[in-house]
Amino acid sequence: MAFIIPSIFIIVFGVAAIKRVNVYNCFSGGVESAFKFTLSLLPCLAAVFMMCELFEASGLSAIIIKALSPAFSFLGVPEELTKLILIKPLSGSGSLAYLTRIITENGADSYVARCACVCYGSSETVFYVSAVYFAGLKQKKLLRPIAISLLSALIATILACALCRVM
């Protein structure tokens, strides 16, 4: 394994030498385009982080959690996971902190903790990933991909809890 990365570099430089490609200029061009992309990404990430903080600070998350808990319970998802399900699309670190709290309060081998772990692992921080993926696009049509991602995360959560109940 220690020889894989050096081997890749030797192969790339060898092919570049054979094709007479100026490796330094290509590398510099790649760094320049990556830097421009990173700068275009910053406003999107700032907006996502502000949305997360406003969602929690405004009390809207508590209202939504209270309203959705019975619906999640009806679908077979423990009520304790409602906040995790709502936070995960917004914040990876926030959902990890809440996952840790669920495990601490309920025990690592409990049904709720198993469901929480599987739900955490089967979903993604949808808004963060969307900000990263769509930051470089000129025409941003985000509604459909975000809606599909959120729906698939919900379906994955319901199936995860059903599987944890059986196992």
Image (spheres, grey):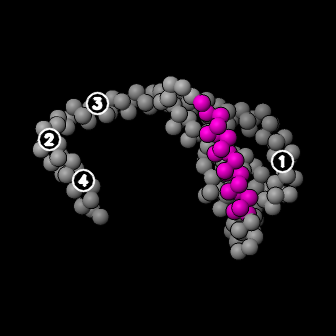
Question: So how many labels did they put on this image?
Answer: 4
Q: Residue 152 at x, y = what percent? A: 66, 50
Q: Which residue is mark 3?
A: 29
| Distance between the alpha carbons at the discs numbered 1 and 2 | 60 Å
| Distance between the alpha carbons at the discs numbered 2 and 4 | 16 Å
Q: Which residue is mark 1?
A: 68
Q: Which residue is mark 4?
A: 8
Reading the chain from its start, which is encountered first: label 2 or label 4? Answer: 4
| Distance between the alpha carbons at the discs numbered 3 and 2 | 18 Å
Indicate whether residue 2 is drawn in magenta: no
Residue drawn at (83%, 47%), measured in percent from left and top?
68
Q: Which residue is mark 2?
A: 19
Is the residue 40 above or below the residue 93 in the image?
A: above
Amino acid marked by disc 2? Lys
Is the residue 35 above or below the residue 165 in the image?
A: above
Kindly report the secondary structure that dominates the magenta region of the rendered protein: helix
* Snapshot quadrant of residue 116: bottom right
* Snapshot quadrant of residue 144: top right
Would you say residue 163 is visible in this rendering? yes
Could you say whether the residue bearing mark 4 is in a helix, strand or loop? helix
Could you say whether the residue bearing mark 2 is in a helix, strand or loop? loop
Reading the chain from its start, which is encountered first: label 1 or label 2? Answer: 2
Which quadrant of the figure contains the N terminus?
bottom left
Indicate whether residue 150 is drawn in magenta: yes
Could you say whether the residue bearing mark 1 is in a helix, strand or loop? helix
Amino acid marked by disc 3? Gly
Amino acid marked by disc 4? Ile
In the image, which residues are magenta? 141-161
Residue 59 located left or right of residue 88? right
| Distance between the alpha carbons at the discs numbered 3 and 1 | 49 Å
